Amino acid sequence: MHIKFSEDVIPLSDLKVNPGKVVNRAKDTHRPILLTSRGRGIAVVQGLDEYEKNEEERKFMKAIAQGLMDIREGKELDLNEVKKKLGVD
């Protein structure tokens, strides 16, 4: 996800005038749109597909980090314990 500041930063007033255009641009470009008010960023408009993809990636990375921390702290399970915990034998 790469923001093109020349295209992806718009004033809040543009959203008020034509919200469909802003939403469609975010959806079509797969990039977030930064909304500004008085020159300051206040919100982001993002297509739902991109949001869900980013959220899934964030959760995956968080799970990996948690797993690495668990290993470092000695919180490991062997394969038989995992199968039992998951109800798979």
Image: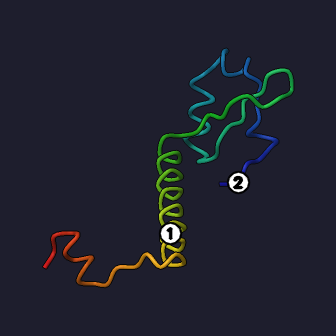
Q: Mark 1 points at which residue?
A: 64
Total of numbered circles in the picture? 2
Q: Residue placed farthest to the right in the image? A: 39
**Rendered location of residue 32, percent (x, y):** 65, 42
Instruction: For label 2, count other residues whose C-alpha is less than 10 Å away and answer few (under 14), some (14-19) or many (20+).
Output: few
For residue 43, which quarter of the picture?
Answer: top right
Disc 1 to disc 2: CB gap under 8 Å: no
Q: Disc 1 marks which amino acid?
A: Ile
- Where 89 falls versus 65 (above or below)? below
Q: Residue placed farthest to the left in the image? A: 89
Residue at coordinates 66% horizontally, 35% vertically from top-left?
Answer: 44
Q: Mark 2 points at which residue?
A: 2
Instruction: Name the mark nearer the viewer: 1 or 2.
Output: 1
* Left or right, residue 44 beside residue 37: left
**Rendered location of residue 89, percent (x, y):** 13, 79
Q: Disc 2 marks which amino acid?
A: His
